[in-house]
Image (tube, helix red, strand yellow):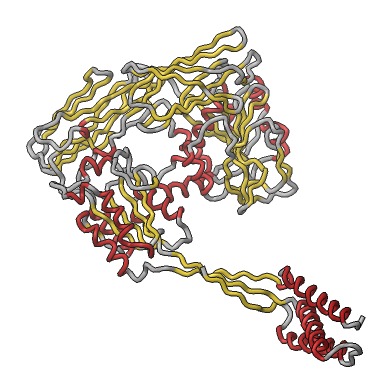
């Protein structure tokens, strides 16, 4: 880093400097033009000391500035991102792979040595998420190339990214098309094309399209995508088994070497609970892989859905977003209704009422029913909300506003929230979505509830609640103080290609509000009934005293037993007023659990089931997608290389004129008067002058 200093001027012109110099000389001349006891040498020395001191003092009066300029060279960043998913191990090497292909990690690591100190090389691997360093394990269960590119861009934002080296087969099963995300990176992408684009002899189940929830006694439809490559004339024998019992069989002949067929079928939900269905295509001789011949799905068979009532006074785009997001979990059925149509509804059918910009007091019948039945209520505030009436109906959030203005606020997650769990990715996504509109005014709270999101105005996080939950008088309530959820829905789909974050937020909120309507004193329930392989298993527990107040004084133990006979013991941790357990990633299997605790002299137990399902996403496609890699390289000014050409990367990067060291100039201004040594110099000159005059008898 190079640092340069110079003097510059603020509000006063630098042309006053000669005047300051003349003032110093004049003052010194007046002091020593007629010395009495001073010799010639001492007179000149005293004249110089006084002239310089006066010059510095007068010079400081015109407020000169010290400008410091720092030149910080930043070497170009070379980012290496290596695909660590299972598809690389299974299909990612070409037929008869060379030794270089087999040692991909070592070859990529050598790039750092070949480029030397002139480049800053950073190494990463990715599958479903981005991780530090290279890897040769190739055990990732998902591939999300666009997420890896986005995370790299966010991590090194405003830095000198010279190039991205992307080693992958081009196959992705999560996230959006990487070509769109790559446009935001603004750097050259060099792709290493792993795998073979020629499909090998293989039968497989490409996809199973189904609803995760069905209803007892009903038939439900499933669509199976059967695929066959280099297998013309072979018979594809598809079987479906439920709990080991075969319930469906069909034979289809592959009519080409690139055969694909969607097979619709109906299955019956004849038992309540989580049902396991195994789809299998019988393997044929010389098949590349039999792992992708089998797919397992889990369907939750329900007796009936919980009904939720959504009341409003006038149409709003938020209403359809709320309905669709909640109903993405088929445990719930949302009935939307105008408040004026309330007399036609049977309120006892509903487990939760959502009041969208209306208040319960608008209808005497509704207010009376909520009070008597302890029906959970979710207030959603907007421009049409009667704020005084809202304040009178609940104490969780009080809004005092003298005018009807609205202001834009972002969602700021609160780390201490513990009533239920939102994934880290959901919290991050929601904090980045467009702002909601909240009433302008002063917000206060009684402090009895828990806040999931605070309001963030611009870059300032306020103490005002955006979304809060509480238990008031034995019933659960929530207050969302903003409208505009339709903006979140559009923005999330545009950015991430799905509505997962919004659906998780509304789904978890509804699950919390509707939980324990039957006033069970001890409840243990998983965050969801079916977890993906590698996903952390989260369980929640609630314990109530005789007054139905949450307590978490005693310990809660839980025993999980897999169908294969393995046992796991855990102790819940206290989380706010309830309990939570992160059991980590468990092996693929079906589990039953028994939790126990003791409050006073009374013992409680709770039982349930959960399932860890395997992820076979990486086995569904064997032919690499080099067209994607070619497009990524071409649109960014990079180049696609084969694994055997990795040793050419260093030369290509050196020859790329866009990859060079960037020097950042950092200017800093400070007042000269802030320099302490200036005052030391002035004091020294005046002290020297006094000492000489004293010694020579001039004083």
Please state the horizontal and vertical placement of residue 279, each as a whole percent of the image.
23, 28
**Which residue occupies the extreme left position in the image?**
233
Q: Nearer the viewer, residue 484 or 258?
A: 258
Q: Is residue 149 left or right of residue 675?
A: left
Q: How many marks?
A: 0
- Look at the image and tell me in which quarter the C terminus lies: bottom right
Please state the horizontal and vertical placement of residue 50, each as a whole percent of the image.
81, 82
Q: Nearer the viewer, residue 691 or 346?
A: 691
Q: In the image, what residue occupies the spot 18% across and 49% down?
A: 99
Q: Nearer the viewer, residue 115 or 217?
A: 115
Q: Is residue 521 left or right of residue 292?
A: right
Q: Is residue 242 left or right of residue 532?
A: left
Please state the horizontal and vertical placement of residue 513, each as a whole percent of the image.
56, 28
Q: In the image, what residue occupies the spot 63% across and 15% down?
A: 545
Residue 648 visible to an observer of this rendering: yes
Image quadrant of residue 594? Answer: top left
């Amino acid at each position: 880093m190079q640092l340069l200093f110079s003097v510059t001027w603020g509000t006063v012109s630098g042309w006053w400097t000669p005047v300051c110099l003349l003032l110093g000389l004049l003052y010194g001349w007046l002091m020593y033009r007629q010395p009495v006891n001073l010799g010639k040498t001492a007179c000149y020395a005293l004249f110089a000391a006084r002239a310089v001191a006066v010059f510095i003092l007068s010079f400081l009066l015109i407020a000169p500035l010290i400008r410091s300029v720092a030149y910080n060279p930043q070497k170009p960043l070379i980012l290496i991102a290596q695909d660590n998913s299972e598809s690389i191990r299974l299909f990612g090497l070409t037929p008869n792979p060379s030794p270089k292909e087999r040692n991909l990690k070592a070859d990529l690591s050598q790039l750092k040595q070949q480029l030397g100190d002139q480049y800053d090389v950073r190494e990463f691997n990715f599958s479903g998420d981005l991780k530090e360093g290279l890897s040769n394990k190739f055990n990732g269960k998902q591939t999300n190339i666009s997420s890896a590119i986005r995370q790299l861009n966010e991590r090194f934002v405003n830095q000198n990214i010279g190039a991205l080296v992307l080693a992958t087969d081009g196959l992705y099963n999560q996230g959006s098309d990487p070509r769109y995300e790559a446009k935001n990176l603004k750097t050259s992408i060099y792709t290493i094309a792993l795998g073979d684009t020629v499909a090998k002899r293989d039968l497989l189940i490409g996809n199973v399209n189904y609803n995760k929830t069905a209803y007892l006694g009903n038939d439900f439809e499933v669509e199976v995508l059967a695929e066959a490559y280099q297998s013309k004339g072979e018979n594809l024998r598809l079987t479906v088994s439920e709990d080991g019992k075969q319930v469906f069989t069909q034979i289809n002949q592959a009519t080409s070497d690139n055969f694909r067929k969607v097979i619709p079928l109906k299955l019956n939900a004849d038992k309540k609970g989580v049902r396991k269905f195994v789809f299998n295509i019988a393997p044929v001789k010389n098949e590349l892989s039999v792992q992708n011949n089998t797919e397992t799905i889990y369907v939750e068979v329900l007796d009936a859905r919980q009904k939720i009532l959504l009341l409003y006074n006038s149409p709003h785009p938020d209403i359809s977003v709320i309905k669709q997001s909640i109903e993405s979990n088929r445990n719930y059925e949302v009935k939307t209704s105008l408040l004026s149509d309330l007399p036609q509804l049977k309120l006892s059918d509903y487990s939760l009422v959502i009041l969208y910009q209306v208040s319960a007091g608008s209808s005497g019948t509704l207010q009376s029913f909520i009070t008597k039945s302890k029906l959970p209520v979710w207030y959603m505030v907007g421009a049409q909300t009667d704020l005084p009436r809202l304040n009178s109906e609940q104490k969780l959030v009080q809004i005092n506003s003298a005018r009807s203005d609205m202001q834009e606020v972002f969602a700021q997650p609160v780390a201490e929230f513990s009533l239920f769990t939102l994934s880290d990715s959901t919290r991050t996504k929601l904090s980045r979505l467009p702002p909601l509109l909240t009433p302008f005014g002063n917000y206060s709270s009684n402090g009895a509830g828990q806040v999931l999101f605070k309001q963030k105005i611009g870059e300032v996080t306020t103490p005002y609640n955006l979304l809060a939950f509480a238990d008031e008088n034995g019933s659960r309530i929530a207050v969302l103080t903003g409208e505009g959820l339709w903006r979140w829905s559009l923005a999330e789909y545009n950015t991430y290609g799905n509505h997962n974050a919004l659906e998780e937020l509304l789904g978890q909120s509804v699950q919390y509000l509707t939980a324990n309507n039957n006033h069970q004193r001890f409840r243990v329930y998983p965050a969801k009934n079916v977890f993906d392989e590698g996903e952390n298993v989260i369980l929640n527990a609630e314990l109530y005293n005789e007054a139905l107040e949450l307590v978490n004084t005693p310990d809660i133990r839980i025993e999980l037993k897999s169908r294969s006979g393995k046992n796991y013991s855990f102790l819940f941790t206290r989380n706010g007023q309830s309990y939570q357990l992160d059991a980590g990633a468990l092996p693929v299997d079906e589990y039953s659990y028994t939790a126990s605790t003791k409050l006073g002299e009374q013992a409680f137990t709770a039982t349930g089931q959960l399932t860890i399902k395997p992820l076979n996403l990486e086995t569904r496609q064997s032919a690499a997608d080099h067209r994607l890699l070619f497009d990524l390289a071409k649109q960014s000014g990079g180049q696609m290389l084969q694994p055997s050409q990795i040793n050419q990367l260093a030369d290509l990067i050196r020859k790329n004129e866009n990859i060079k060291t960037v020097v950042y100039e950092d200017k800093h201004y400070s007042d000269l008067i802030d320099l302490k040594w200036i005052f030391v110099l002035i004091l020294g000159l005046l002290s020297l002058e006094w000492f000489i005059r004293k010694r020579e008898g001039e004083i």
